[in-house]
Amino acid sequence: MIDGNEVSCWQAGQDHPRPFLFPIRGPSGRSLTRIGHPGAPNHDHHLSVWFAHAAVAGIDFWSNKPGPRIRQKEWLAQEDGDNRAVLAVRLGWNDGHDAGDLLEQDVVFSASPLGKPGEWSMEIQATLRPASPTLLFQKSNFGLLAVRVAREVSEHFGRGRITGSSGKTGEPALFNQPNAWMDYSCVEAGHEEGITLIDHPENPGHPARWHVRADGWMGPSLTRTDEITLKREKPLVLRYLLVAHSGPADPAGIKVQSDSFALSSRWMVTRSTRPHRFNEVRRSGE
């Protein structure tokens, strides 16, 4: 919550196939994201803002097929403050055969208010650590982070516009193209607001090639052109910045946020020395 208003909520109930963030509220108070496709009944795996991948050693963690599930295993830390709220959790990716998780994923979310009323940002840092010495993430458009925008924000169903860091707009010009960031905004008069997702320059394949659709979803495709082998002794760290903003996409403003994000340090979860506190979250170097 920021200034007493809920901006997002981490949904980690065991009845879901994977955890997710919903809602993602814009400055108006409306959610800029939704659950499911507004025109197709077979997209219940689209969960607002979520992690998944379609080809992990041949296993589909993207769709809702029986078996593979991503579950929260542990609350690592939670901190509230005047300038930011931080949540850290541990997830397990299991193929459904009860033989242990294929990999663990530690996620840190850090939400902060921005300069304009109602605007805010959230850093999302994911650390992927396989149980075996190596684990293959195969080539796929689908994964690792995705956003399903609200109906009125989409280009096809609403009055939305997709804009990339290249300056181009619309699905035909942006699908599978490298962009350091992608923005999806509603441009209807009186309701202009949107969501920007920024890819950190240290992420593999940066600038990401985006799977972005006029029907209302976008995601930086981690393995669109190359497979990635995760290594247990060297966990993969991925970083993204999500921004909820008023007005249409502002490339100059997004560049300022992107440059600041690029210079920021990673988050670390450490054992607390304070009484009644197990873990704390801080930036490396703090």
Image (spheres, rainbow, N blue to C red):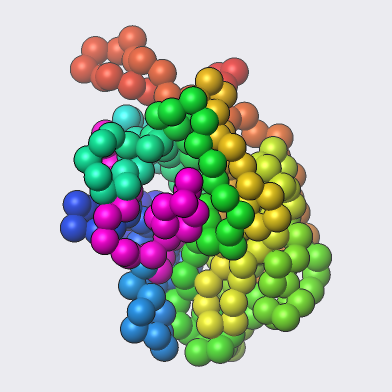
Residue 259, image quadrant: top right
Residue at image position (32%, 47%) is 95
What type of secondary structure mainly makes up the magenta span?
loop
- Image quarter of residue 183: bottom right
Asked whether residue 253 is drawn in magenta, I would say no
Span colored in magenta = 46-74
Q: Position of residue 18 (x, y in %)?
A: 32, 54
Q: Residue 102: image x %, image y %?
A: 38, 37
Q: Is residue 197 above or below residue 194?
A: above
* Rendered location of residue 201, percent (x, y): 72, 42
Which residue is painted at 71% across and 47% down in the image?
205
231 to the left or right of 281: right
Residue 217 versus residue 21 in the image, above or below: below
Left-right relation of 273 to 233: left
Observer able to see residue 121: no
Residue 259 visible? The answer is yes
Q: Quadrant of the C terminus?
A: top right
Q: Magenta segment: does it hold 64?
A: yes
